[in-house]
Amino acid sequence: MEGAKVFIADDEVLIAFDLEATFQSFGAQVVGPWFTLPEAMASAERDRIDVAVLDFRLGTETTEPVAHLLMERQIPFLFYSGQRLPELLSCHGHVLVEKPAMNERLVEAVARLMNRP
């Protein structure tokens, strides 16, 4: 994870800051964390990102628009959510890590997305 730019969008502040600390402890540089859809969209449009971790919901909105933008930019991402993703979700082939999960499991899933050990 050394030097990787990991984008984090999660509206649960404690979880977001825990994820930030976890990825930083593995040498990643965190982009965010973002707590609202407008913040996340603006960052996803402008920032250099290697991989992203998205909670499915940010408040009352979903991160599906962020996921679409990341797909357009060919940036790998996964959803980290405590709820089931809708069947109609148009982000085909998405990865879901269910909350709560051990931080090491999430880091491993992100590393796999990036093809890093």
Image: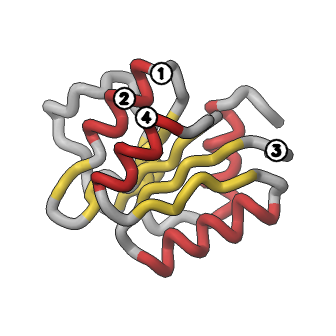
In the image, what residue occupies the spot 40% across and 19% down? Answer: 72
Tell me whether the residue at label 3 lies in contact with that at label 4, contact meaning CB atoms closer than 8 angstroms. Answer: no
In front here: 103 or 52?
Answer: 52
The residues tagged by marks 2 and 1 sit, at their Cα atoms, a distance apart of: 6 Å
Give the CA separation, mark 1 to mark 3: 19 Å
**Do residues under tags 1 and 3 come within 8 Å of each other at their CB atoms?**
no
Q: Earlier in the sequence, mark 1 or mark 4?
A: 4
Residue, disc 2: 69
Who comes first in sequence, dot 2 or dot 4? 4
Proximity of marks 2 and 1: CB atoms separated by less than 8 Å: yes
Q: Amino acid at mark 4?
A: Glu
Alpha carbons under labels 2 and 3: distance apart: 22 Å
Mark 1: which secondary structure?
loop
Q: Which mark is residue 63?
A: none
Amino acid type of the residue tagged 3 in the rendering: Gly
The amino acid beneath tag 1 is: Arg
From the image, tell me which residue sits under label 1: 73
Query: Quarter-wise, where is residue 27 in the image?
Result: bottom right
Circle number at residue 45 = 4
Q: CA distance from mark 3 to mark 4?
A: 20 Å
- Given the image, on which type of amino acid does mark 2 rest? Leu
Q: Which residue is mark 3?
A: 3
